[in-house]
Image (spheres, helix red, strand yellow):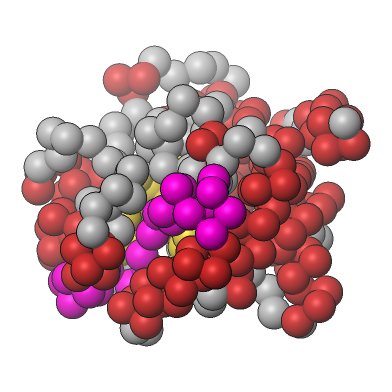
C-alpha cells in the first residue's frame, strides 16, 4: 500500500509549464535510448533511427530556443545484435560518437541455453556495441534460485568486458514487489551498471509502483556500498507528459545526481515523436501534424 500511495503522490505532482516544460522535455530527449526492436528491422530503418538520434529535434525549432549548438542528442540507440554493425556504420558516417546498445541473452524471453546467451553478448560487443541490455532468466527468480541467477549475471558481466551492462528484470513476470526488490539487489551485486524494468514485450511493462521498488533498491544499495547503479524504465512510455513524471520520480527518489545519461535512461521508440510535437507547440504555439516532423 505504501508503494502504491507513493506512486500516486508522484503522479499528482505538478508538471512544469511553458519554457520550463521545454527545458525538461529537452532533458528527457538526452536520456532516451532510441530503440527499434522489431522483426522487420532492416539496415535502412536502423540508419534512419541513428540519424534521428543524432538530430532528435528539428534544427529550426532548437535554434528558436537557442539550443541548436548545445549538442542535444539522445543518450544511445538500441537495436538487436544482428543490427549492431548497421548502427555502428551509420553513426560513424554521421561523425557521431553516440553509443550503440544491443539487447542480448535470448531477448525477450531469455529461454535459450546459457552458452548461446553468452555467445550472443560476445558477438554484439565485438561488432561494436558499447552497452548490452541483458535479460535475466525469470525462472530462476520466480523459483527463488537467487544464487544461480547471480552466477548467470556474473558470467554475462564477464562476457560484456568493457561494455556497460543493463539488466532487464521483466518485472511484469516476477509476480510480486518482493521478487522485484530481490532481483534488483541480486542484479546489482552481480555487477550491473543499470537495472531495467522490462523488455517492452511483456503484457505489463514500466509502471510507477514497480519503479519505486527498484529505485528504493538502488538507493539501499548505494547507502550500503557507496556505488551508484543506474535505472532504465522501458516499455509503454509514449507521451511527453509521462516522460516528465519519470523525471520527477527519479528527482524525488534518487536526487539530481541520477538525472544524467550515466545513471538514468528512458527506453522508448515512439516517445521522441510526442516530445518533439510538444517542443514544436512551445516554439510556434501550434501543434504539428506527425508528417511535419522527421520520423525515427
Q: How far from the left and from the top, in percent, is residue 77?
A: 33, 54
- Residue toward you, 55 or 229: 229
- Residue toward you, 182 or 196: 182
Q: Is residue 154 visible?
A: yes
- Residue toward you, 128 or 280: 128
x 69%, y 53%: residue: 181
x 17%, y 49%: residue: 47
Q: How far from the left and from the top, in percent, is residue 251?
A: 78, 53
Q: Quadrant of the C terminus?
A: top left
- Residue toward you, 173 or 251: 173
Image-quadrant location for residue 73:
bottom left
Q: Is residue 63 visible?
A: no
Stretch in magenta? 120-145
Q: Quadrant of the N terminus?
A: top right
Q: On the picture, is 190 further left or further right than 226?
A: left
Q: How far from the left and from the top, in percent, is residue 24?
A: 67, 45
Residue 240 to residue 82: above or below = above
Q: On the picture, is 104 further left or further right than 48?
A: right
Instruction: Inspect the magenta stretch and tell me whether residue 125 lies in it.
Output: yes
Residue 77 to residue 197: above or below = below
Instruction: Inspect the magenta stretch and tell me whether residue 6 lies in it.
Output: no
x 41%, y 53%: residue: 137
Q: How far from the left and from the top, in percent, is residue 19?
A: 71, 38
x 51%, y 36%: residue: 173
Amino acid at each position: 500500500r505504501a508503494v502504491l500511495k507513493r506512486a500516486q503522490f508522484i503522479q499528482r505532482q505538478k508538471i512544469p509549464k511553458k519554457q520550463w516544460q521545454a527545458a525538461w522535455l529537452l532533458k528527457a530527449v538526452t536520456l532516451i535510448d532510441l530503440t527499434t526492436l522489431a522483426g522487420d528491422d532492416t539496415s535502412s530503418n536502423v540508419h534512419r533511427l541513428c540519424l534521428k538520434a543524432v538530430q532528435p529535434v528539428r534544427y529550426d525549432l532548437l535554434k528558436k530556443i537557442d539550443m541548436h549548438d548545445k549538442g542535444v542528442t539522445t543518450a544511445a540507440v538500441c537495436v538487436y545484435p544482428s543490427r549492431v554493425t548497421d548502427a555502428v556504420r551509420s553513426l560513424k558516417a554521421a561523425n557521431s560518437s553516440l553509443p550503440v546498445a544491443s539487447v542480448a541473452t535470448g531477448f525477450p524471453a531469455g529461454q535459450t541455453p546459457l552458452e548461446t546467451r553468452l555467445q550472443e553478448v560476445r558477438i554484439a560487443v565485438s561488432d561494436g556495441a558499447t552497452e548490452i541490455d541483458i535479460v535475466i532468466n525469470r525462472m530462476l527468480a520466480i523459483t527463488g534460485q537467487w544464487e544461480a541467477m547471480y552466477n548467470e549475471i556474473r558470467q554475462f558481466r564477464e562476457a560484456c568486458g568493457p561494455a556497460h551492462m543493463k539488466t532487464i528484470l521483466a518485472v511484469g513476470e516476477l509476480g510480486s514487489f518482493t521478487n522485484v526488490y530481490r532481483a534488483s539487489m541480486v542484479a546489482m551485486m552481480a555487477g550491473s551498471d543499470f537495472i531495467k524494468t522490462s523488455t517492452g514485450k511483456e503484457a505489463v511493462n514500466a509502471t510507477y509502483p514497480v519503479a519505486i521498488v527498484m529505485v528504493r533498491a538502488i538507493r539501499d544499495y548505494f547507502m550500503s556500498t557507496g556505488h551508484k547503479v543506474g535505472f532504465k524504465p522501458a516499455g509503454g512510455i509514449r507521451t511527453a507528459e509521462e516522460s516528465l513524471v519519470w523525471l520527477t520520480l527519479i528527482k524525488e527518489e534518487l536526487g539530481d545526481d541520477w538525472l544524467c545519461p550515466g545513471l538514468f535512461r528512458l527506453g522508448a521508440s515512439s516517445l521522441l515523436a510526442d516530445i518533439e510535437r510538444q517542443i514544436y507547440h512551445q516554439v510556434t504555439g501550434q501543434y504539428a501534424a506527425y508528417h511535419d516532423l522527421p520520423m525515427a
